[in-house]
Image: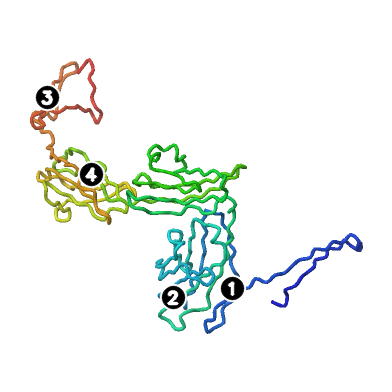
Amino acid sequence: HQSEFNYWSCPVVFGPYEPFSTKRTLSLNLLWIPTRGTGMQEEEKKPVFLSAMVGESVIFSCNLDFPRDVVVPYTLNWNRGNEKIVSIQDGVLVYAKEGYVGRVSNSVHGNRADLNLSAVRKPDEGWFECRLFFPNRSPPTRLNGTWFHLSVLGSELMGVPPINQTVAEGNEARLECVSKDPNARVVWYKDNEYLSNIDELQVRASTSPEGTLTLISTTPNDIGWYKCEVISTTGQIQSASAFLNVHYKARVVHTPRQVFLPIGRPGAIECTYMANPPVTRMRWEKDGFLFDPFNVPGAVSRRNGTLYFSKYSLAFEKVEESHGGDYTCTPNNELGTMGPSPLIKVMVQHPPVFTVTPHNMYLRKPGDTIHMTCDALDGSTRPTIVWFKTGARCHRTGRS
């Protein structure tokens, strides 16, 4: 209570010996958290105290107190002091104040909403609050509101850490890293490798006097984690990391020049591509015309691979003569495409045909010679003929 604000003493007495007693005087201060008038008494909740190093991430967890535990449309506002910095509607981030864009993300797990604040910096220190509103109910809010206090540690060397960024291919990327000590040395890494050791970045990367990294003419190869390391003259080190994402049009990486498909059996044509954002559509053409697998019985186009590097396959359940021809594949994402692939020449192959086959049974006396004949044609050429005995391949010996 406010009446308890005063100086308090804590004496420690060793038995009856008053001269050997000791006393510690404490000052009790009251921390008052402001509340807003909502027409009802606010529920008294204890604040949550969090701490993070400069450049690290911190998670604020807010309880979603739905009426009767039934999920209804809601708005969750995150405030810094009395100012709204983030707004979430029905689990979707719809607003982030300047300075928090690219640094905040949200996730909802049942009745708990988490706000992740990355690239923590010294100005982030202070009070945060989450408040839940129901726009379609009366009253629009319940007894809610959780306060958080964030303490930022380790700001002696690094003033501003880098934050995650997304840029379009060819544009410039700037990853801030501001050192407080003008005599400190700033070193950058990409995916835990010294930036100065990456030949591809030698002519495109530069570091400002305060430590900010600039990449010009970004390419898909620039995607990755970048770490800024500030080293003082006394050897003290502080580091922070950020992810650089580069968006680019979908493009074909590799296709075979020729594909041989066996008639009457399953077969596939493969098209390897890169895309970020992911591919939304793959266009196949055959002999200069659209080839839509959905309109071809027994044909299907399917994708497999990783997020950035994937492969589409045009598969046939049963190869026919009509499937032969010149094919191209063209991947598309929301940014467009870099164009079709080179021609893929598909040739339908027939299996070899036996022209002479051995008899089903041979009867000979021990010591006699057995002559078994077998011949075949593969188009105009003679295929390789291999003999087997009870499932095992026969090898040439002195007797055969």
Circle 2: is it few (<14), some (14-19), or many (20+) Cα within 10 Å?
Answer: few
Q: CA distance from mark 1 to mark 4?
A: 60 Å
Q: Is residue 240 above or below residue 82?
A: above
Residue at horizontal 56%, vertical 58%?
A: 122
Q: Nearer the viewer, mark 3 or mark 1?
A: 1
User: How many tags in the picture?
Assistant: 4
Q: Earlier in the sequence, mark 1 or mark 4?
A: 1
Residue at horizontal 41%, vertical 54%?
A: 165
The one of 41 and 201 positioned closer to us in this rendering: 201
Secondary structure of the residue carrying numbered label 3: loop
Q: What residue is disc 1 on?
A: 45
Residue 373's disc is 3
Q: Nearer the viewer, mark 1 or mark 2?
A: 1
Residue 106: x and y in percent read: 44, 63
Circle 4: is it few (<14), some (14-19), or many (20+) Cα within 10 Å?
Answer: some
Q: CA distance from mark 4 to mark 3?
A: 40 Å
Q: What residue is disc 4 on?
A: 270
The amino acid sitting under disc 3 is: Thr
Residue 70's disc is 2
